[in-house]
Amino acid sequence: MRVLPITCYRPTPQKVAEFASLPYDVFHRVEAAEYVQSHPGSFLAIDRPETAFGPEQDMYAPEVYEKAGELIRAKAYDQTLLKDQTPCFYLYRLRQGDHTQIGVVGACSIDEYEHGVIRRHEKTRPQKTKDRVCHIDATGAQTGPVFLTYRDNMVVDIIVDAARAADPIYDFTDEYGVRQTIWRVARPVAVEALQTAFAAVPCAYIADGHHRASAAAEVCHERHEETGTDDEIAADSFLAVLFPSDQLKVMAYNRVVADTNGLSEDELMDALRNAGFTVGEPQPDAVEPSGPRSFGMFLNGSWHALSYDGETAAHDEDPAEALDVSILQNKVLGPILGIEDPRTSNRIKFVGGIEGCEGLERRAGSAGIAFSLFPTTVDELMEVSDAGLLMPPKSTWFEPKLRSGLFIRRV
C-alpha cells in the first residue's frame, strides 16, 4: 500500500477541543443545527454549512457550499487554524472507557482505491457523493478522514509505539468522554519507516467514509480534466486514518421501521415463523442478541427474541448473504415489511448501537417496530470486501467516532 505523509491546516492547541467535531453524517439536519447553535465554534458549522441558514433553505444550493468556503477561510484568518507545512504523519489515539485504538493519519492513493487495493463494502449514493464533491470544491480541502483498517502488521505497531515516546500535540477529552490524543511524526527517518512498513501491507478496507472516498476520487478526475495533464497532484490521494483491525470496536447498527406494513401483530408473527424464525414470548425487558442469527424485536410495547433457523447461501459462496443484516433485510424487512430498498425508503431508520435498546423503543414508539442485531464483525467486513461483494447499507457502527476538522488537507 502507498501511504503518504501530509501537510495540513489544523487547529491550535488552545482551540482544538472546541473546534473538532463529530462527522457530518452522524447528524440529522435538525440535530446538526442544534449542535452548531450550542457549539458555534465547532467545525460542524463548516462541515454542515446549511446550519447557517433557515430550515427552509435547500441544503445543496450553491450558496450553502460558498458559506463553507467562507467559514473555513475565516478560521484560518482568525488563527483558529495553523498551517503545518512539513510533510508528516500523525498518530491518532482514541480512548473510550477501557477501549483504546491508535491509527496513522496520512494520505492514501485514489488509484489504489479504484483498483481494489483499498476495498469497499457499501454502495454509494450519487447525491451524497455530490454533496462532498461540492464541499471539497468550495473549501479547497479534504476535511473529514476516511476510516480505514488493515490486518495487523507488527512492524507498523513497533514504529507507532516508538513514535509515541514524544509529547503529543493534542490531548483533550471531548464532550462524550472520549479522550483524543495526537502525536506528530515529522522526523524524515520515522516518516520513511512508516511509508516502508505500509508498503508491505497488501490492502486496506474502508470501515467508514465510503462517500468521502468516492467524492475524493471524483475531485481527482475533475482536477486532471481541468489541467489536462497526468502529472501528480494533491488530489491524487485522500485523507485517511488507518487502524489495525484487532483494535476496532464494532457495535450493531439496528433498524426501526415506521409501521408494520398493514399487518396485525398475529399476521406479523405468522409471517416471521413462515420465513424460518422462532419467535419468543413477549417480555418487558429489552432483547440484546447474544450471537449470530439471533435478533430482538420491539413491537406494541414488548420485546420478543427471534432466532433464524432457515437457510441462507453458503458462507463460502456468498459471505454477504450470510450476514445477520442480510438475513433481516432479505427475510423480514423486504418481503414482510415492504422495505425493498433500504437506501431510499423513508419508512426505515438506522440506529447506531451506541443508543442502546432504549433508543430503539423511543424511535419505534407505539406504531413502529424495532430490531436489535448482533454486531457484524471486522473479519466479516474484510471477508465480504475480499470477495468483491457488498453489504446492506449501515451494516457496521464503529465506536468511538473519529473527529473531523483535526486535519484539513488542501487539494
Image: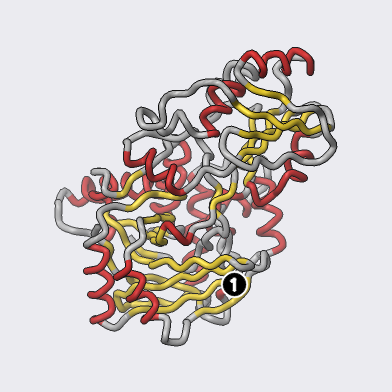
Q: Residue, x 40% and y 40% (percent of image)?
A: 121
Q: Residue, x 45% and y 51% (percent of image)?
A: 135
Q: Nearer the viewer, residue 400 or 63?
A: 400
Which residue is tagged 1? 179
Quarter of the picture holding the N terminus: bottom left
Q: Is residue 259 left or right of residue 170?
A: right
Coordinates of residue 174 in the picture (x, y in percent): 63, 69
Does 241 appear above or below 169? above
Q: Quadrant of residue 238?
A: bottom left
Identify the coloring: secondary structure
Residue 107 appears in the picture as rendered: yes
Does 257 appear above or below 167? above
Label 1 is placed on what type of residue?
A: Arg
Q: Is residue 91 left or right of residue 337?
A: left
Q: Nearer the viewer, residue 113 or 86?
A: 113
Coordinates of residue 72 in the picture (x, y in percent): 49, 64
Coordinates of residue 298 in the picture (x, y in percent): 76, 32
Quarter of the picture holding the C terminus: bottom left
Q: Circle 1 — which element? A: strand
Q: Residue, x 24% and y 75% (percent of image)?
A: 193
Q: Give the mark count.
A: 1
Does 122 appear above or below 75? above
